[in-house]
Amino acid sequence: MDRKKTVLVVVAHADDMEFLAGGTVARFIDEKGYDVYEHILTDNSKGSFSLSPEELIEQSAREAVEAAETLGLKEVRLEGYPDGLLNETHPNVLREKIMAFIREVKADIVMSWDPFAPCEDHPDHRTVAMATFEAASFSAMPLYHPEHPDPPHMVTEAYWFAKCPWNAECFVDISSTIDKKLDALLKHETQMALTLEGLRREAEILGADASLFADQTAEGCRRIMEMGVRDFCAKKGAEAGIAAAEQFRYEKLGMLDMLLNTDLIKADF
């Protein structure tokens, strides 16, 4: 019998998960019956062209909870570190917080930004990637943070995502869950407005027609984002011969299969 797994998604910003892994998370929950938790490390306080940091922090937190409810997550936990400055927090502090969450929920799978993917411009993404990788690698070691209330726990699998994937040969078919992915993503109204305005400004700089992005109402955001996300996932799917996909570098974190040439750890997709 297949065992029920627990998944912990660790990201820098609200909407990271929905953009790159929302359809896969929906499949974990809807098809596999897995419990999925989300750990968002920053407060999203720099993600707007129009809102103040205070307004943004409040609205973004509310949107993160609504998106989590749409997908059916067990919990979304907000750490609230300043957006864009995650690298100023000591890596061991971040690693410890993630490790504590891993042990608390007994995570079998972690999902996060790929610590080894190239061309990642955002320091928050790079920082959370390595902290998650280290936390998952050492969460089973009892002398790492013995003060934790929960016992050591071994993570056995990782799904790493990236804007520029590296060695990422796991394509998850999200044809059945792309609508739910979009519904969850569009709960992040502040971030959708940020994306749309960024696209408009880019079009203007390049001398392209920016009128496509002129309608910045909720409906305008939905239309553009839905078109873009569906096209992006279709292109990913085409690489694997499926209609719509999300792409990951899947990794077994345990040593048993490698040393004994067994196949005890099996990817779900």
Image (cartoon, rainbow, N blue to C red):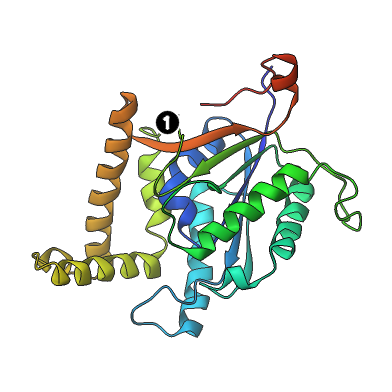
Vertical position of residue 16 compared to residue 106: above or below:
below
Q: Quadrant of the N terminus?
A: top right
Image position, residue 248 (x, y; %) = 47, 37
Residue 191 image position (x, y, % from top left)? 39, 66
The residue lying at 39 percent from left, 70 percent from top is: 190
- 19 vs 105, left or right, is left
Task: From the viewer's side, name the closer residue of 89 and 212.
Answer: 89
Check disc 1 and give the amino acid type.
Phe
Q: Residues within 10 Å of mark 1 (few under 14, many from 20)?
A: many
Q: Based on the displayed image, in which of its 4 quarters is residue 39 positioned?
A: bottom right
Q: Could you tell me which residue is drawn at 57 percent across and 75 percent down?
A: 82
Residue identifier under label 1 = 171
Quarter residue 238 falls in: top left
The location of residue 21, given as percent across then percent down, is 47, 44
Q: Residue at x 52, y 76 (%)?
A: 57
- Observer-nearest residue: 35 or 229? 229
Q: Position of residue 100 (x, y in %)?
A: 78, 55
**Label 1's element?**
strand
Q: Could you say which quadrant of the image residue 90 lies in?
A: bottom right
Label total for image: 1
Q: In the image, what residue occupies the spot 13% across and 63% down? A: 212
